[in-house]
Image (spheres, rainbow, N blue to C red):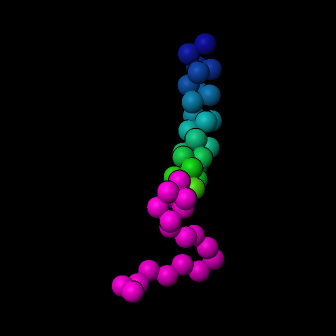
Amino acid sequence: MADENSTLVELLKYPVAIFSVLLALIIGKYALGITFGLVAEISTD
């Protein structure tokens, strides 16, 4: 049983990390007004 749990944790580790980053980008877009697109520019203006 413990071996099955560790295998499941290993399988879910990377999809959960990717989902967390995607969720953070979505929150950043709407809460902070950060735009993400094909071309993004960071400048002092």
Quarter of the C terminus within the rendering? bottom left
Within the magenta stretch, is there residue 12? no
Considering every residue shown, the one lying at the far bottom of the view is: 45
Query: Between residues 31 and 24, which one lies in front from this camera angle?
Result: 31
Q: Which residue is drawn at 50% across and 65% down?
A: 33
Q: Which residue is drawn at 54% across and 61% down?
A: 29
Expressed as whole percent of the image width and height from the top left, the position of residue 34 reads 50, 67
Q: Is residue 7 above or below residue 28?
A: above
Query: Between residues 21 and 6, which one lies in front from this camera angle?
Result: 21
Expressed as whole percent of the image width and height from the top left, the position of residue 6 reads 56, 25
Quarter of the N terminus within the rendering? top right
Q: Residue at x 58, y 41 (%)?
A: 16
Image position of 42 (left or right of 40): left
Q: Quadrant of residue 15?
A: top right
Image position of 45 (left or right of 22): left
Expressed as whole percent of the image width and height from the top left, the position of residue 21 reads 53, 52
Q: In this view, does 42 lie above or below 27?
A: below
Expressed as whole percent of the image width and height from the top left, the position of residue 13 reads 56, 38
**Count of numbered labels shown in the rendering:** 0
Q: In which quarter of the image is residue 9?
A: top right
The secondary structure that dominates the magenta segment is loop
Within the magenta stretch, is there residue 30? yes
Q: Can residue 7 be seen in this view?
A: yes
Q: Can residue 21 be seen in this view?
A: no
Which segment is the magenta one? 27-45
Q: Is residue 31 above or below residue 43?
A: above
Q: In this view, does 11 lie above or below 35?
A: above
Considering every residue shown, the one lying at the far left of the view is: 44
